[in-house]
Image (cartoon, grey):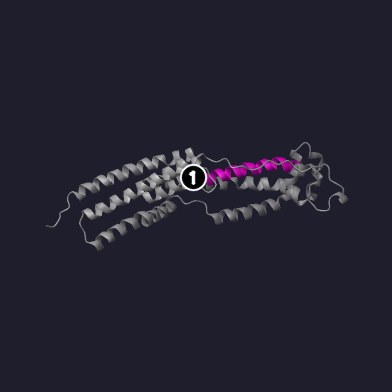
Amino acid sequence: ALAGVSLAAVGGPLALALLLTLLYMFFWAGVALIILGRQPGAGAALGSFAAIWAALTIGLPLAGSALTGMADPGPSAIRYVDAQRQTGDEVQAERDALLAAALNARPDLRPFAERATTLDYATRLSFLVPETERRLAPLRARMDEHRARQERIARAAGFLIPPLGIESAFATLAGTDPARQRAFEAQARAYQKQLRAIVHPLVQREITQPPAPDERATRGRLNLAAPLDLPGFALAERSADARGAGVLPFAVWLALLAAAIAALSLARIREWKVAG
């Protein structure tokens, strides 16, 4: 075992990471040989290699990010925060009307619609938070669509700019890539809705059966006969094989690219002239 993890479970990703590392080294070795094939001086060779490295690892990614941002600007986080504030203010301004409508829409709560203005804080939130999220959903969807487009562009750029591709491949193998983040967010959201489906009806049930004052010293407190049997959260992870399959296309492309550069560098080496 390695760090408490069975080698059998991580052997595939580790082997693929090693292969990617070797291919990446061959890529840069080929670039260096092509530069040396021009037979420059030591200073010129180092300068040329540094310029190519800087262009591929810093210049092109920054330029691509700037161009992509100008061509496809997405909703800003500041705008989303401002939208949350405005939507929260709107919902609070319409609070009594929204609560009355929610109670009237439920046959079991309709007889108690006159209590809409006297509901405790926790009970109000069980109605108002879903309404707030519903109003913010279009903006949230636009942000998610923009993020998905940016990730597709980044994946494509990884094939054109090897340093970006190798970074993305290592992140995928390690399970720290954007796809895993999206999966976590989606599963956490589903779990949140699952908990709401269990807890909200219990909170709202007290509208029809309000406890006596001496039974509830704290507003919004649930008085349960027994503890709730709530489900636990367990993130469904991609298997190591699935993560490996996700980086296999880039590994094949990097191998072909390294082979092409190696062939070109060998052809340049044959033209070297050795001083007699």
Is residue 70 something that shows in the picture?
yes
Q: Is residue 200 magenta?
A: yes
Q: Nearer the viewer, residue 130 or 178?
A: 178
- What secondary structure do most residues of the magenta stretch adopt? helix
Q: Is residue 232 magenta?
A: no
Q: Which quadrant: the C terminus?
A: bottom left
Q: Amino acid at mark 1?
A: Ala
Furthest residue toward bottom: 43
The span picked out in magenta is 174-201
Q: Residues within 10 Å of mark 1 (few under 14, many from 20)?
A: some
Residue at 28% across, 50% down: 30
Q: Is residue 55 above or below residue 8?
A: below
Q: Nearer the viewer, residue 109 or 223?
A: 223
Residue at 40% across, 48% down: 166
What residue sits right under mark 1 in the picture? 148
Q: Is residue 73 left or right of residue 270?
A: right
Q: Nearer the viewer, residue 137 or 28?
A: 28
Furthest residue toward top: 107
Residue 261: image x %, image y %?
28, 47
Residue at 72% across, 46% down: 126
